[in-house]
Image (cartoon, rainbow, N blue to C red):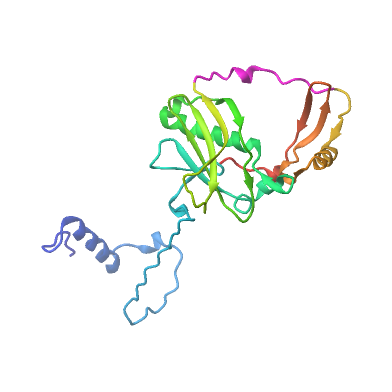
Amino acid sequence: MLASLERRHDGLEALEHLRGRLLLSGAVDLTRLFPVAGRFVDLPTYPWQRTPCWVKTTSEGQRLLERHYVHPLLGYRLAQQQLTWEAQLDTRKVAWLADHQVGESAVFPGAGYLEQCLAAAHEWQAASAEEDSLPDVLDLEDFEIRAPLLLDDTTLRLTRLSLDSRNGAMRLESRETRAEDADKWNLHAVARAFTATRGRLLERRAPALPTRAADLDREAHIAAAAQLGLHYGPHFRAAEQIWVDASAGAGALRADPGNAHAGR
């Protein structure tokens, strides 16, 4: 007979002891829980030598082991500041960014700014609305790139995107992680999330592509861009055909599925 109450233990602790004794007594068929027989080994005869192992943090580490990235480019949300996200970017951490080069430097692409802004707008609306009332589309307006964001494989750039909940205004800034002045941020882009969107822009039809032969194919476009100092690696070669007119241009894009990157 096994007791479920003990004088020296409270109710929960006594039940834990009872469960252990039941397992040791053989009253529970453990083969149903563990159908694969394990390998028995002899335990050491000396007492356990417990050694705590803690990861030492540095100021450059930004406590990333405790961060949860909500988006690969937007980064993690700061707990101390409202609607602010930070991310560490360089061409080794996000290797495909090295495929977008201007001159001798890798430059953060304009589509990357848009991706960060859309991800921040989504996080903002998801936090302020019921799940079943989230809008199907997100609109950005007043988007403007103020300065290029240069990347390399030796210096981490810390990006910060802040969103004003009063009007949806966003600012994207960056600084070096080892900068002596931690309060000195460089402004790269601004935008505003349009909160009352109805997706009317999606009702517009894309212009039809010309029926004549394209002026540039993929290889010709890459070569022409290289002459201007724009070097596009495999991840930025989606332009398959390009037509150029006196006042406008059109293009057909086809991305390589092997180079696609999930947003989450």
Among all residues in the image, which is located at the extreme bottom? 45
Where is residue 240? Give x, y as percent. Answer: 80, 35
Q: Residue 226 appears in which quarter of the rendering?
A: top right
Residue found 18% across the figure and 64% down from its top: 2
User: Please, which residue is most extreme toward the right here?
Assistant: 213
| Front residue (pair 75, 23) | 75
The magenta segment is 196-210
Q: Is residue 146 left or right of residue 132?
A: right
**Quarter of the picture holding the N terminus:** bottom left
Residue 205 among those drawn in magenta: yes
| Relative to 3, residue 102 above or below | above
Where in the figure is residue 100, as x and y percent of width and height? 70, 44
- Name the quadrant containing residue 42: bottom left
In the foreground, 243 or 108: 108
- The picture places residue 146, in percent across and down from the top left corner, at 61, 33
Classify residue 45 by image quadrant.
bottom left
Residue pictured at 78% horizontal, 29% vertical: 251
The outermost residue toward the left is: 7
Measuring from the top left, give residue 90's x and y in whole percent: 60, 50
